[in-house]
Structures are given as C-alpha cells and as structure tokens.
Amino acid sequence: MGFNDMLQARELLRAGGPVLIFLLFLSVLSIAVILERYFVYRKKINVSRHLITYARAQLKNGSLQKILTACERDISRNTPAANLLFKMLTSTKKGVQLRELSQSIIEWEVTKLQARLSILATLGSTTPFIGLFGTVIGVMRAFVDLSAASAAAAGPSVVAKGIAEALINTAAGLFVAVPAVIFYNYFTTKINFFEKELENIAEEIINED
C-alpha cells in the first residue's frame, strides 16, 4: 500500500467515523469465524466421511470389530462419526433404544458443529442496520453543517462530508452482512447434509444388529 493509498484509507475512516470503525471490527470478527468454521468442518466432516465409507464397506463383510478399531483410531480427533459409531458399537442397547441413543448423539454432534454460526447469523441480520444508523448520522451531520453555514458559503462542499459518511457506512454494513449470510447458509446446508449421512450410517448399524 502506497502513501497515497494510506491517505485515502485514513480519509475514508475519518469520513465514516466511529460507526465505520465498529463495522470494520465486525468484519474482522466475521472473517475469523468463517475461517475457523471452514477449517473445523474440513477436518471433522471429511475425516468422518472417510470413516463412514470404511464402515459401510465393513458392514457388508460383517466386520464390526474392524469398524470399532477404526473408530478408536479416529476418536482422538473428536470427529462426529467416530464418536457416534464407537458409542453405538460399544452399547448394549438394541432396536428402538439404540436408535434413540444414536439420535441423541447425532443431535449433540450437530449442535457442536453449529457453534459460532449464530455469530454469522447475527452479523448478517444486524450490520445493515448498523450501517443504516451511520447513514442517518451522516445525513444529520450534513443538514447541521448546511444550517450552520452562511448563505454565501452554502454549497455542495458543506454537506459533502456528511453525505460521504452516510454512503460509506451503508456500503460497509452491506460489506459485512453479505459474506456473513452467504457463509451461514453454506455452512448450515453442509451440516444438514452431513447430519443425514450420520443418520444413514446409524440406521445401517441398527439394522445390522
């Protein structure tokens, strides 16, 4: 970033005021949550899918002990599939009771995966209003500056700062909200599909018993 770019960034921050600084903080928070959830899902869901694929192959051969051994290997990673299959295979419950156990385990694992998604949902729904709040402040400042200026000095330059603040904060609010909503929907869909995969392999284990 050159010197001129730094000056322009400083002018933007000055024009946006405290609301813009707060929105920039929320933008950093949103990016941090998105990256953290992305890497968590890539690890836990991908490893779980490999285990599910392996377990499904071993079920056809009737090798439940091999599935249990694989679960013991993956359980240190605290992956949903390993936790589910290990608890089901080591349980003495059968039939309906085993199905109820599997459902409670799946619900708990899904709840853990959904952690921090509420932050994205909150940012996606509130940051446009925060930007709108900055817009209102900017417009109010523009009218105050205009009313304070003399008739001879009144002109576009008088209201330019307030209007700039209004437009910058509106854009910043949308800049934070749009990625937050997109990734919230993406992660939610990913979790929903994975939940069905866990339910399917759990049902196959139950039917095998």
Image: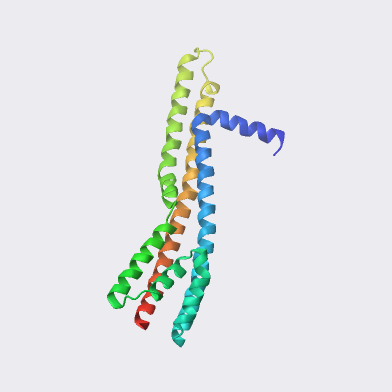
* Residue 131 locus on image (x, y percent): 45, 36
Count of numbered badges drawn on the protein: 0
Q: Quadrant of the N terminus?
A: top right
Residue 76 against residue 168 in the figure, above or below: below
Question: Looking at this rendering, what residue extends furthest in the bottom direction?
Answer: 61
Residue 16 against residue 189 in the figure, above or below: above
* Residue 81 locus on image (x, y percent): 45, 69
User: What residue is shown at x 29% (from left), y 78% (from top)?
Assistant: 95
Residue 124 against residue 143 in the figure, above or below: below
User: What residue is shown at x 36% (from left), y 63% (from top)?
Assistant: 107
Left or right: residue 74 versus residue 117 is: right
In depth, the one of 42 and 124 nearer the eye is 42
The quadrant where residue 153 appears: top right
* Residue 177 locus on image (x, y percent): 46, 45
In depth, the one of 188 and 65 nearer the eye is 65
In depth, the one of 163 and 172 nearer the eye is 172
* Residue 83 locus on image (x, y percent): 44, 68
User: What residue is shown at x 48% (from left), y 54% (from top)?
Assistant: 183
The quadrant where residue 114 appears: bottom left
User: What residue is shown at x 69% (from left), y 33% (from top)?
Assistant: 4
Q: Quadrant of the C terminus?
A: bottom left
Question: Looking at this rendering, what residue extends furthest in the right direction?
Answer: 2
Check the image and tell me how it is coloured. rainbow
